[in-house]
Image (cartoon, rainbow, N blue to C red):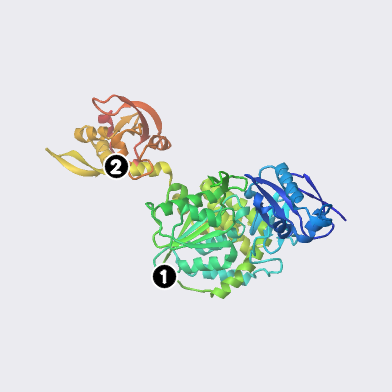
Amino acid sequence: MNKTILSTTGTPLNQQDNGTRGGYIALGMVGNKFAVFSLLNKQVQILGSSDLKEMNLKALFGALWCEQHYNEFDAKKEEVVFNHKRLATDILSACQAAGTYSETAERRVGVWKMNDGQLVVNGRQLWRADGTVLEHGIHEGQVYPVSGDVGFDLSTPMATREEVNKVLAAFNSPQWIHPMAGELVLGFLGMSLVSAALSRRPHVLMTGPAACGKSTVLGYVRLMLGRLAHPCSGPQNLAGLYQSIGGTSKAVINDEFEADSRSKSCKETFEIARMSYSMQEEDKGIVRGTSSGNSRSYRFCSPFIAAGISPGKMEPADLTRWVTLEAERTPQGERLSDAEARELGPKLARLYLSRWNVFQASEDVVRDCILSLGGDGRMADTIGTLLASYWAFVSETPATEEDAKFLVNMLGIEERIAVHQVSDELQCLEALTSRVVPFKVVAGAALVTRHLSIAQAIEMVCADPTGQPELVMRLAQMGLRVAFAKGKWSLYVVNSPMHQELRKLFAGTKWATGGWSVVLRRLPGGEESTQRIGAGLGAAKVTVVDVPEHLLSAGNEDNMLLAA
């Protein structure tokens, strides 16, 4: 039975297939090149004008198919010839009719989510977790090319409960300081298998002294993920990550990750991890120009797991996307050989895919539990995803509310909430108040020079608002004023990013060139006002925030009256 091959836009290509393997589907234009899906090798081909030659077309689309569809009698030569020019014209016309093609439509080797919410695996075969086998090609507007072996298939046996417990024991072999650390690593493993199908992809950072077992656990994860892992060492740069994980669903397994806020590579690694956390398939990602004058989109859906001795200081935006696990001393307990880890990985993958619905239902319950106990939305996304992923390995049924409460309480939710409450505004205030500068202060009957932090200077003014005139004057020169108004102590900070003294105070931070006014305004009491900072200085736009409680002396009501 003949059938018409359609382009992705539904345009008939007027090519009849009588059973011979071969042909193509027009995908669209990439600049002045043509994107087609070869029905012979089941791969996307980007063709330029020079590629539309006779032998190349036969190699791409099948020699027999080309002869059956494009052989015609040449009256001059008095023989049948392959009219490759007509085929080239048909390709050009069909691709132009299909419009612009983006490689973001390709779903290469990995696990992906279809429109019905269920998973499809692109490996040696294209198959769904329910056992349905599909042809490599175009489904629901997405291109599934032949692109590699995912490491497991429908014939792979599922891991048993005993095997899951064996892996969990190996993940818990380091002496973790935090409870349920091994369970979170197991949750990361499951989440990494289906990362492209998730809306949130938390990251894990393991730290501790040398020989505590963190790199061993990292090695287990790498071996178990197999072809779905991208192993690397140390902070990576943007260009390398663009080329290695852009558009893939591979998890980044990063050993020897010594975080350094001054390192460009470290910042770029965190930047890509931040984007990977919540990037969706329809997002354009990072768009870069190419040497041909066309644009190229880089999308990232890779979870990161890293191990290092010195975790460094993360930005608040990273703290809420990463879970830090700390180990101490020598590891104890069960260990796995490399062969065992490689053997168990595919079995764990088959088990997890069969429990995709368990994960989805459990995620909602665990997330709601974290929110009800005081965690914020980001924390619920980060911790909730990992705990629900762990649950899918150990249970055939979704977590109940009681199960979720047990998991969250075992985790030590109060400590996690405290970590996630670190914010940019608190970090900005800390950067300002921790700066140490020389001040002239009154000590008895003498005026002496002392090196004080801005916080200490603020504390001295609140404790004795009229006894330190030199200190108050110096603060004013820095664009700062401490005042008691409306029944509370407030700190005024000049807004202008051109204030040279404030720029010095914020030097070396991300507010070195300004922006502190907008961020500080999010603190308690934060508002914009017009105030005089000091005697002899004109009125200026300032940000007003409450002086932190720990800088106020206990029982300083008399000082408040004096200041008023």
Mark 1, residues whose alpha carbon is within 10 Å: few (<14), some, or many (≥20)?
some
The percent position of residue 544, horizontal first and vertical second, equals: 37, 32
Q: From the viewer's perspective, is 510 left or right of 276? A: left
Q: Which mark is residue 557?
A: none
Q: Which residue is mark 2?
A: 455
Residue sitting at the far left? 445
The percent position of residue 106, horizontal first and vertical second, equals: 65, 52
Front-most of residues 322 and 544: 322
Q: From the viewer's perspective, is 208 left or right of 291? A: left
Q: Which mark is residue 211?
A: 1
Front-most of residues 111 and 393: 111
Question: Which amino acid type is shown beneath numbered disc 1?
Answer: Ala
**SS class of the residue under badge 2?**
helix
Closer to the chain start, of discs 2 and 1, is 1
Depicted 544 relative to depicted 385: above or below: above
Residue 95 shows in the view? yes
Tell me what residue is drawn at x 19 percent, y 43 percent: 450
Depicted 342 relative to depicted 444: above or below: below
**SS class of the residue under badge 1?**
loop
Spatial CA distance of label 2 from label 1 is 40 Å
Residue sitting at the far right? 1
Front-most of residues 491 and 306: 306
Question: Which amino acid type is shown beneath numbered disc 2?
Answer: Ala
Tell me what residue is drawn at x 42 percent, y 54 percent: 266
